[in-house]
Image (cartoon, rainbow, N blue to C red):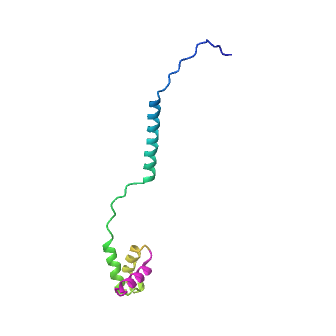
Amino acid sequence: MSVSTGKTASRQQVPVFVVVIMVIALIGFVAWRGWAALAGPAAGKLPPPPVQEINFINGKAMECKGDFTKLNADDQAKVQSISRGFGPASMASTYRRLSKPKE
């Protein structure tokens, strides 16, 4: 059983402007974190295009006239590594694109 002394503890009230400042700070913090989460990383500079590999594929496509089997084993291996396993398709499509008449 609790004993009441008859005295009530005096409570200090927080001023209204402090509550308003804290609410504004909380909304600002939540907005800042939301923006940081949804904006994603800053975009960096793009790497240069692989010009040497593109020129090699273009040259070999014209040399073999799009037929991958006409390339020697070393060139086939390099084309396969550049095109990540799509050597025959790469040669055929590159040859078609390069031999198409310019409009």
State whether residue 95 is above or below residue 34. below
Q: Quadrant of the N terminus?
A: top right
- Residue visible at 63% across and 13% down in the picture: 4
Q: Is most of the magenta stretch helix, strand or loop?
A: helix
- Assess whether residue 63 is covered by the magenta stretch: no
Magenta includes 101?
yes
Q: Is residue 101 above or below residue 22?
A: below
Q: Residue at x 46, y 48 (%)?
A: 34
Q: Position of residue 100 (x, y in %)?
A: 37, 86
Name the residue at the right extreme: 1
Quarter holding residue 3: top right
Residue at (44, 80) in percent of width and height: 89
The residues colored magenta run 85-103
Residue 34, compared with residue 95, is above or below; it is above
Viewer-closest of 52 and 10: 10
Give the residue at x 66% y 16%.
Answer: 2
Q: Quadrant of residue 53?
A: bottom left
